[in-house]
Image (cartoon, helix red, strand yellow):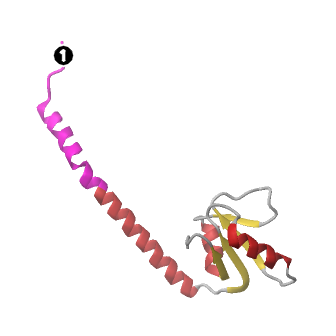
Amino acid sequence: MTAPLCISCYISKMTEIYDMPMKIKNIEKMIQFLGRLVRIILRALNGIVPKRRDLVVFISIPDFTDNSMALFEYMDSLDEDFELVWIVKNPRDDLDIKQYKAYHLPAILKILRAGYIISTHGNL
């Protein structure tokens, strides 16, 4: 014996499929709104959090390369008392450098406290 055909169930499923693009657009709008809200909060915090003039943050999202790396090596060779910190996508254990994973809270806090930020690839 076969299960009876439930017309209302079929129509309900078709309506869900039909409404799917609208739900996706709503989710995209919500994500955009949350992104804007986070940026507003971070900008407000940036104005409040005191800066450390001896903290230099280097941001290179792919890895340790480009002009940021050259400037880091130069600053590291100086006898100045700077705290040099890297923020990257994938921290490496084989380097003797203070590193933080990009977009995580410790990295965000370092950026907020930094007196100087050197960034590549327009990733700020």
Q: Position of residue 6 (x, y in %)?
A: 14, 29
Q: Position of residue 39 (x, y in %)?
A: 47, 75
Q: Amino acid at mark 1?
A: Thr
Does residue 53 lie above or below 89 as drawn?
A: below
Residue 57 placement: quadrant: bottom right
Q: Residues within 10 Å of mark 1 (few under 14, many from 20)?
A: few
Does residue 103 lie above or below 10 as drawn?
A: below
Q: Position of residue 77 (x, y in %)?
A: 85, 77
Residue 82 placement: quadrant: bottom right
Q: Nearer the viewer, residue 49 or 124?
A: 124
Count every numbered label the image shows and give the total.
1
| Label 1 sits on residue | 2
Q: Nearer the viewer, residue 92 or 42?
A: 92
Please check the rendered image and state whether residue 99 is part of the magenta-colored stretch, yes or no.
Answer: no
> Split into 4 quadrants, where in the image is the C terminus?
bottom right
Please check the rendered image and state whether residue 3 is part of the magenta-colored stretch, yes or no.
Answer: yes
Farthest top residue?
Answer: 1
Question: What residue is rendered at 29% in x and 58% in y?
Answer: 25
Question: What residue is rendered at 21% in x and 38% in y?
Answer: 13
> Split into 4 quadrants, where in the image is the N terminus?
top left
Looking at the image, residue 123 sits to the left or right of residue 26; the answer is right
Farthest right residue?
Answer: 79
Indicate the secondary structure of the residue bearing disc 1: loop
Looking at the image, residue 121 sits to the left or right of residue 83; the answer is left
Question: What residue is rendered at 63% in x and 76% in y?
Answer: 111
Please name the predominant secondary structure of the magenta segment in the image. helix
Q: Nearer the viewer, residue 83 or 9?
A: 83
Q: Position of residue 58 (x, y in %)?
A: 68, 73
The residue range painted magenta reads 1-24
Residue 30 placement: quadrant: bottom left
